[in-house]
Amino acid sequence: MYKIYSVWAGIILLVCNEAIAQPNSTKTDGENIPSVRMKEITVSGKAIATPNGRLLLDTPTTTGSRLGLTPRETPASIHIIDRATIESRGAQTTQQALERSPGVIVSDQPGSAGTVCMRGFCGAQITQLFNGITVQYDVIAARPIDNWLTERVEVLGGPSSFLYGQGAVGGSVNYISRTANREQQGHEALVLLGSWLNRRAAYGYNGRIGDTNNWLQVHAGYKGSNGYVDKTQHNSGVFSFSLLSDLTNRISNTVAVEYQKEAREAYWGTPLLNPVTAGKYDPETRFKNYNADNSVFDQQVIWVRDILDFRLSEATQARNTFYWYDADRQYKNVEVYRWNAANTLINRSASFATDHKQNLIGNRLELSHQQSLFGFPTKWLAGTDIAFNDQTRFPSTESGLAVDTIDPYNFTVGSYYDNPRASGPIKDRRNKLFTVAGYAENRLTLLPGLNLVSGIRVDHIELDSRKYTLPTATEPASFSRDWTPVTWRAGFVYDITDNVNFYTQYSTAASPPGSILTTSNFSSVRDFGMSTGKQIEGGMKFDFWEKRGTATIAGYYLQRKNISTRDPNNPINTIPIGAQSSRGVEVNLGVRLSTQWSFQGNMAYVDARYDDFNELVSGHIVSRKGNRPENIAKWVANTWLSWDFHPDFQWMLSTRYVGDRYANAANTIPVKSHVRLDTQIAWRAHRNAKIIGRVMNLTDTDYIEWATSTPMYLIGAPRSYEVAVKLDF
């Protein structure tokens, strides 16, 4: 890796010198808008799409700010993966689209299938949004789905509670759906077939309805696989419909409906041989699945949104978004497998079944306005968000108990209900979460090229929890808690030229001290206040080489305090005094090298650690101060190289490096680093048809996607192949 880091360092120095050396361009009304744009590159008279070329620094986003600012105008790290890039890279799920963002690690482990790690934080510390809406159960609700319904994914590094409420300490991910629009007209279809009978079929349409002021969008997709691990069949379907109507020349309304259904058999991991500190597994168990036969890991989700846009004047707009979310999830699994001391048999335990029933209803109203304040151009937005989140869980009662012992190579596991202690789902707890929030944002031009961007949010959160099973001394039949966190951000963006700017920002966050509020119990929240987070970040964003290339560089320090940790004086209690921090650097680069070659790459370094954290081990308190959090790699890097060697052919090679990690807070179970290579070739067989052949994990590397402290490894897919046909007509 030393050579790779040296090459990256050389690239950074070169592009920085090139960018700063460029002459200034004309500015207009203090706005940071380049007066010259790079022309579209053409070959044989045809425009060449460059999804793996320049970064999208001048595309307005909805994630880093509600003001409609571009990444270049926002004092934060924002990465956009648009629809063209998703398709070009062959990403089939939302997690595959997200995975290669700067510094990001993802996992679809069945227990928390929506796990994302950024900037040294994982799971519930990363807010995942659906069209800017959090369901407050992101690590479960954001499980990877077919991204045929996804228009783009936006990734914001660092705290963003001032935008989206409690949570969002390490960053935010926003999955933005395809909805009816006025720009596109036509049909599209996709069919795919690959290894392990991986299969996909999809259709979509967007267009105007006759000569009316109505636009219709419909998308539907099916995705299935037999799985590269035994007993991991998967089938899913997605559907979306939306209607955009211009009611008057000032008022438009969008109704959007999405439905997702997934049935999946779960792979919980491959057990490590003893001693587990060696971090090794038996290669002969590589594709074995010790879960129960006909395991269940299913969900059904429906989203409904109504978006009313009202242009009061050229300077003032209002938007109201009503939303409703309903989700049912079902699980029946045997989840933990461990070798015996002699590494001859495997002990299976932790059979567990549960249902989740979650319902969210809310309304968001926003008003934006542009004006001059004492001669300074300014843009502001204010809004309110009211949401009621209701979730009931139905866990079984036998969780954690031993199930059986089997031969690891020749075994029968039976069904979940073969365990005589298996109770099946039993109604246990209902949590009702009521949130009322008020927020405001502002962008103020202090001097030509110098802008102050600020935001603040106040949330009032009320939690009512009821336990339906027998109460205990530590878990009462019901309890209520409320919090009123205030979070904010302030940052400066300074344009040295229209092509180069520097930024700096300070932001804060608030999150539950030890759990997710929609599923929390009394012992996890008690009378604890919110955990607090803060981040200091600075960096630069710039064009170089006559705007053929774009790049961003960011450095940050991030800390979360008031985390629940074990009381050193009383091991059975938790107290909110823990702390965790990280510091790091992220580099993102995209360049159109010529009419035929383009390159995009990113690299992230993070030094993450527990500042104050105690763990209960065999009845004793052990400090983990100074240790690296689980599954956090110091180095993560990705590259894409595209070659349009013929007007109708394109070849692409992508690489991914993930550094070494640890599977536990004690840092005693290692996870080795890995490099993955993917390649593909695309042929424009007809003006309306493209055929793509792909090879994933070209070198057939055994790599660890995720590690659990059980300990088990979730091992990634071996070399695989697929062929896809994409039609646009």
Image (cartoon, rainbow, N blue to C red):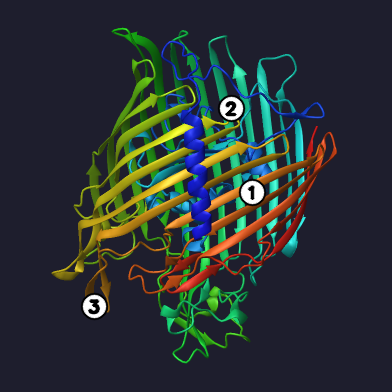
The amino acid pointed to by label 2 is: Glu
| CA–CA distance in space, label 3 to label 1 | 45 Å
- Give SS at disc 2: loop
Q: Residue at x 69, y 35 (%)?
A: 594
In front: label 3 or label 2: 2
Q: Earlier in the sequence, mark 3 or mark 1?
A: 1
- Is 694 above or below relative to 588? below
| Callout 1 crowding tier (Cα within 10 Å): few <14, some 14–19, many ≥20 | some
Residue positioned most to the left: 569
- Left or right side of 485 for 401: right
Q: Amino acid at mark 3?
A: Gly
Image quarter for residue 86? Answer: top right
Q: Position of residue 47 (x, y in %)?
A: 74, 29
410 shown above or below 204: below
Residue 619 disc label: 3
* Residue wearing tag 2: 546
Q: Give the mark, 2 or 1, whose residue is nearer the N terminus.
A: 1
Q: Is residue 651 left or right of residue 7?
A: right
